[in-house]
Image: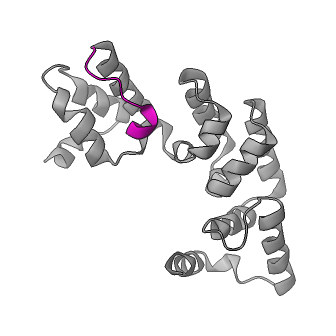
Amino acid sequence: MQSSRNGILRYPVYYLKNTEIFQNIVVRIEEELGIPQNSGMFLYGMRVLCGSSKKSIELKYQLFKTFGWTEYDISELLRRNPIIFLICEEKIRKKLDFLMTELGYKPHFLATHSPLLSLSLEKRLAPRHHVLLVLKEKGLLDYNFYTAAIKTEKQFLKILIEPFKKDAPGLLELYQSNKGCSNIDAILR
C-alpha cells in the first residue's frame, strides 16, 4: 500500500482525470500492457500510458521486434518493468545493441531480467563490462555480467575492484574513466 500512495503522491496528474478517461486507462493497462490491477507494476503502467502516446508505445514495440523480440517477450517485459517504455527510443536501441549484439543476451533473458534495460549504458553497463573483460583477460575472475551490473556501486567496488588492485593495476582508473567520474575514491572509504 505504501508504494501505491507514493505513486499517487508523486504523479497526481495521472489520477486527476475525467472518470471515463481514467476507466479507459485502467482497462488499457490490463488489456494492452497485460498488467493486472493487483500487480505492483500497475501504477507504473499508469505512468506509461499517461506519459506516452499510443504512437510512441507502438514505435518502441516495433523497435524491440527489429531486435528479434517476440510478442511474448515484449509482453513479459511490459508486465515486469513497464517503465522501460518511458525511455527514449535511441537509448533503448543503444542498450539493446550493446546487450544483444555485444554481450549476446537473448530477448527472453532480457525480458525476465529487465533491470538491465533500466540501467545507464554509459555510466553503469559499459564501464562494468570493461572491468569484467580486464579481470577475465588477466585470468583473475570470470564473473556473471548481470550480477555485476545490478550490484550497488559500493558492492561492485568492494567485490570487483578492491580485491584486484594489485593484480590489475589501473583497474579503478579504467572504471573511473569509462564511467566519466572521479568520486569513486569517496565510495571506497
| The N terminus sits in image quarter | bottom right
Task: Please provide percent x and percent y for residue 140.
Answer: 25, 19
Task: Please provide percent x and percent y for residue 81.
Answer: 62, 55
Q: Compare residues 1 and 96 and report the one nearer the observer.
A: 1
Task: Please provide percent x and percent y for residue 103.
Answer: 53, 24
Residue 91 visible within the image: no
The residue drawn where x is 70% and y is 81% is 15
Q: Compare residues 81 and 60 and report the one nearer the observer.
A: 81
Q: Quadrant of residue 167?
A: top left
Q: Quadrant of residue 54?
A: bottom right
Residue 20 visible within the image: yes
Q: Compare residues 15 and 152 and report the one nearer the observer.
A: 152
28 in the magenta segment: no
Q: How many marks?
A: 0
Q: Which residues are magenta?
A: 139-148
The residue drawn where x is 22% and y is 41% is 158
Instruction: Relative to 178, say whether 167 is above or below.
Output: above
The residue drawn where x is 75% and y is 64% is 49
Q: Main secondary structure of the magenta part?
A: loop
Q: Is residue 120 left or right of residue 21?
A: left
The residue drawn where x is 60% and y is 68% is 40
Q: Quadrant of residue 127?
A: top left
Task: Please provide percent x and percent y for residue 141.
Answer: 29, 23
Q: Is residue 111 left or right of residue 144?
A: right
